[in-house]
Image: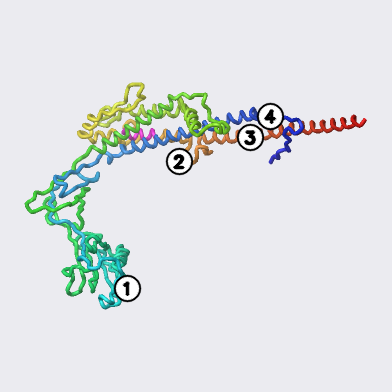
Amino acid sequence: MSINPIRFSGIASGLDTEQIIKDLMKLERAPLTKVQQQKQSLIWKREEYREANKQLLSLQSAINNLRFESSFQSRLATSSNSSVVDVKVNSSAAESSYNVKVHTLATSPSITSSAMVNPDSTKIDMKATLNVADYTIKVKGPSGESVEVNVISGTSSRESIISEINAKSSVTGVRANFDSATNRVFFTSTKSGKDSSIEISDSNNLFNLDNSLKDPTSGVFKKTGTNAVFDLNDAQGLESSTNNFSLNGVTFTFKSTQSATDSMVNVSVGRSTDAAMQNIKDFVSKYNEIIDTFMGKINARPDRSYSPLTAEQKESMSEKQIELWETKAKVGLLSSDDLLSEALRTFRNTMNKRVLNAGEFDSLSDIGISVMSDWREFGKLKIDEVKLQEALTTNPEGVINLFSAVPSDVTKKEEYGLAERLYDDLKNQISKLTKKAGSATIGSSEAVDGSLIGMQMKEYNSKIDRLNDKIRTVENRYYKQFTAMEKAIQEMNSRGSWLSQQLGQG
């Protein structure tokens, strides 16, 4: 550890030695400033590479959707009367047709009280009104589990009882709500169907429930739900505990009932090209976006008059000025870059190649996707949506094969589908960019890692450390020299004063 020498700043000489040394050190710091600027440019360049890698990962995700047959096999279901039967399908649904008639809907059991005489939440004085000090209400729901709610005179209120019932709803499957507009309490079940019921044991009928629901033997108020009853094709009187019924990837939702004379609702399931069309359009859009971005970086020319700012330069600038300056300083960092250029050439070659033994469609142009020949478009793709729609409709298997074919002999690269080829191309290019700049998700832009730029960063850090050591040594030497000069001048001044005194005495 070096110790700074004692510094005398112009005490004897009258010189501004601090400023003189500061000016001298500007020259000494010039090499350090240059290295720091080079390091900053490298940091920005790494950020550019990492951003390019993120875009390639995004394109890889888009092309991945075209590598699998399931991405092309979407289904579309229609109902002749969706107000009675609505329908949804998944990709596993087979092309088919169904006739449905809905006789009854599934219901959840519910019990509603009559309007209460005293509906507010004041404390219940059961000893005065019911001639009891306390008693228990039992609630049982579709779960088959029952819970007890203790009602204590002068402490409990309708509000507290309802709150306790709801606190135990996870056990019973029963919830209670008070409606202030009608002064009624509603007990509802979380499940529907004939096997779902609500049972309330309340010997004093604190909630003023309908006595017609009371079992004369047990004294329990009970309500049971109903199943949905429907006909499906030739099968009559089918039942479901809910208003949803699934069969072969098709989910029917019953919304209202029909009379005996109403005609059956026809549900048809067919192939849909919407998902495949959208997946292809998304891929083309992302592909063209990357070409625009990469070519913009490759063709940008740096302005050498804008170098990374030093800390001293930033001190005299506003944040907006710094931002504008650095924006210009970052232009052209990847000018004529080999990695980006190689990626675009590779992609363009893949998109232009045919797929051997693919069948009717063995190139993108066969399904309405062309590689633009105009050199200013740099090989971007263009879609003829009418032709693509026709290909997806008339020969969906051919389109699937063009993108996702995998030959039985994996060595026959020319028989792989275009999506498979491009996916591998992207994998290779992403790997090369990662080796160059490191992972975009691990470490900061200044991280020293195993990437090429990471190793360069390590070299710059070492060089900066060495230059800082050298600068400190030189600066200390200057101070030491000026301090020696000050001491010498001070000693000369002292001797001069003594000599003057001696002469004056003589």
Residue 422 falls inside the magenta stretch = yes
Q: Is residue 376 left or right of residue 115?
A: right
Q: Residue 365, position in %: x, y? A: 27, 27
Q: Residue 343, position in %: x, y? A: 41, 29
Residue at left offset 78%, top offset 33%: 487
Please name the amino acid that badge 3 sits on: Asn
Foreground mark, 4 or 2, reads: 4
Image quadrant in which the C terminus is located = top right
Q: Does the residue at mark 4 contact the one at mark 2 (Cβ under 8 Å)?
A: no
Residue 17 falls inside the magenta stretch = no
Foreground mark, 2 or 1, reads: 1
Please name the amino acid that badge 2 sits on: Thr
Mark-to-mark CA distance, 3 and 2: 32 Å
Q: Which of pointers 4 and 2 lies earlier in the amino acid sequence?
A: 4
Q: Looking at the picture, does residue 173 appear above or below residue 438?
A: below
Q: How many marks?
A: 4
Q: Which residue is mark 1?
A: 154
Q: Looking at the picture, does residue 387 appear above or below residue 209?
A: above
Q: Quadrant of residue 22?
A: top right
Of all residues, the one furthest to the bottom in this rendering is 131
- Secondary structure under the numbered disc 3 in the rendered image: helix
Q: Which residue is mark 3?
A: 468
Q: Is residue 359 left or right of residue 53?
A: left
Report the span colored magenta.
417-426
Foreground mark, 3 or 4, reads: 4
Q: Which residue is mark 2?
A: 441
Q: Which residue is mark 4?
A: 20
Image quadrant in which the N terminus is located = top right
Name the residue nearer the viewer: 209 or 47.
209
Q: Quadrant of residue 410?
A: top left
